[in-house]
């Protein structure tokens, strides 16, 4: 939720299966979004009410369809994002996070988004998309074990399991987390070889867990991963100097696109 251009608050909404019907009234929209529950825009009827404007960015088709029915909604699409070199099926969340990160922190830029899917998306010094990678996110990897084997459903817990675990839950977490951290270290090393002055921004629901893991790899002097996270050609800078966590990237991106759109009207 923004007040003017200032981001006030963000919420996560529960995952839905696409069964929700497009609401007809304000009270029904409020049920769908905690952001709208906080707002009383005056007026007693839907006709008198000043509906807050809503800027929509979605990669989930049934959510896009649902929120397009909101009376003061503006749908943002891939073509609205001024990131050169995009391919047509690129996720608009990846494009916007990368563009926003580059605009805020500078180019070259690599964004690692730890969400349902874990994505890496990079652009060069001219802000031109270089490319990226997509893999299942942390929760999705753990869930796939539960769904495809007799392994248990895990409860949220300490993010740093022992690597050599002696119980099933920690063994599952260890396998998923240490493999993700090692894989990301490898991607980061490769990126830094090509773009040695690049910033790297972590975002998405799992950004803290990813950050902690990468930091632990860096700090562990016994780990061969220490070297891979250092910046080639720049001596032995610790990797965390280059890593920034920013959980509001997408919202800042939406705000910037909105400002551009309003300027051009
Ligand atoms: N209440 C929650 N519901 C779902 N995921 C959560 C929750 N709290 C933390 N997470 C973590 O956030 C990740 C999802 O990140 P998020 O950025 O919300 O995903 P996306 O926007 O890609 O759906 C999951 O991998 C999970 O580990
Ligand atoms: C990979 C994604 C599903 C990520 O989604 P998320 O984890 O944010 O839910 C999304 O960026 C997407 O639909 N991408 C399209 C394919 C591509 O980017 O190449």
Image (cartoon, helix red, strand yellow):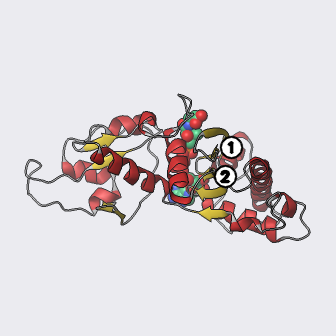
181 to the left or right of 118: right
157 to the left or right of 237: left
**Image coordinates for residue 92, horizontal then vertical, percent:** 49, 39
* Residue depicted at x 72% and y 50%: 195
Crowd around label 1: few <14 · some 14–19 · many ≥20 (10 Å): few
Q: Mark 2 vs mark 1: which is more N-terminal?
A: 2
**Image coordinates for residue 255, horizontal then vertical, percent:** 38, 54
| Vertical side of 200 occupied by 130: above or below | above
**Image coordinates for residue 111, horizontal then vertical, percent:** 61, 51
* Residue depicted at x 80% and y 60%: 229
What is the secondary structure assignment of the residue under circle 2?
A: helix
The residue at which mark 2 appears reads as: 138
Nearest the camera: 116 or 200?
200
Q: Is mark 2 within 8 Å of ligand 1?
A: yes
* Residue depicted at x 41% and y 38%: 80
Q: Which mark is residue 52?
A: none
**Image coordinates for residue 246, horizontal then vertical, percent:** 55, 62
Ligand 1 - quadrant of the structure image: bottom right
50 to the left or right of 14: left
What is the secondary structure assignment of the residue under circle 1?
A: helix
From the viewer's perspective, is the residue at label 2 or at label 1 nearer? Answer: 2
| Residue furthest out toward the top | 88
* Residue depicted at x 24% and y 48%: 28
The residue at which mark 1 appears reads as: 144
């Amino acid at each position: 939720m923004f007040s003017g251009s200032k981001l006030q608050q963000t919420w996560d909404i529960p995952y839905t299966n696409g069964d929700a019907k497009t609401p007809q009234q304000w009270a029904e929209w409020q049920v769908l979004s905690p952001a709208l529950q906080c707002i009383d825009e005056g007026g007693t009827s839907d006709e008198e009410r000043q509906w807050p404007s809503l800027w929509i960015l979605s990669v989930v088709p049934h959510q896009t369809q649902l929120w397009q029915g909101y009376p003061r909604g503006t749908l943002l699409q891939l073509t609205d994002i001024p990131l050169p070199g995009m391919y047509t099926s690129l996720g608009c969340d990846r494009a916007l996070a990368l563009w926003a990160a580059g605009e805020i922190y500078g180019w070259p830029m690599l964004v690692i988004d730890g969400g349902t899917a874990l994505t890496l998306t990079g652009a060069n010094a001219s802000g031109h998309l270089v490319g990226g990678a997509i893999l299942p996110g942390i929760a999705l990897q753990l869930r796939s074990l539960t769904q495809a084997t007799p392994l248990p459903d895990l409860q949220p817990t300490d993010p740093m399991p022992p690597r050599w675990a002696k119980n099933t839950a920690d063994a599952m977490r260890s396998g998923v987390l240490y493999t993700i951290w090692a894989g990301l270290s490898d991607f980061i090393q490769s990126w830094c070889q090509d773009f040695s002055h690049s910033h790297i921004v972590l975002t998405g629901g799992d950004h803290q867990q990813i950050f902690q893991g990468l930091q632990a790899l860096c700090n562990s002097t016994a780990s061969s991963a220490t070297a891979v996270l250092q910046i080639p050609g720049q001596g032995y800078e610790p990797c965390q100097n280059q890593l920034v966590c920013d959980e509001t990237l997408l919202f800042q991106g939406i705000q910037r696109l909105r400002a551009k759109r309003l300027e051009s009207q």
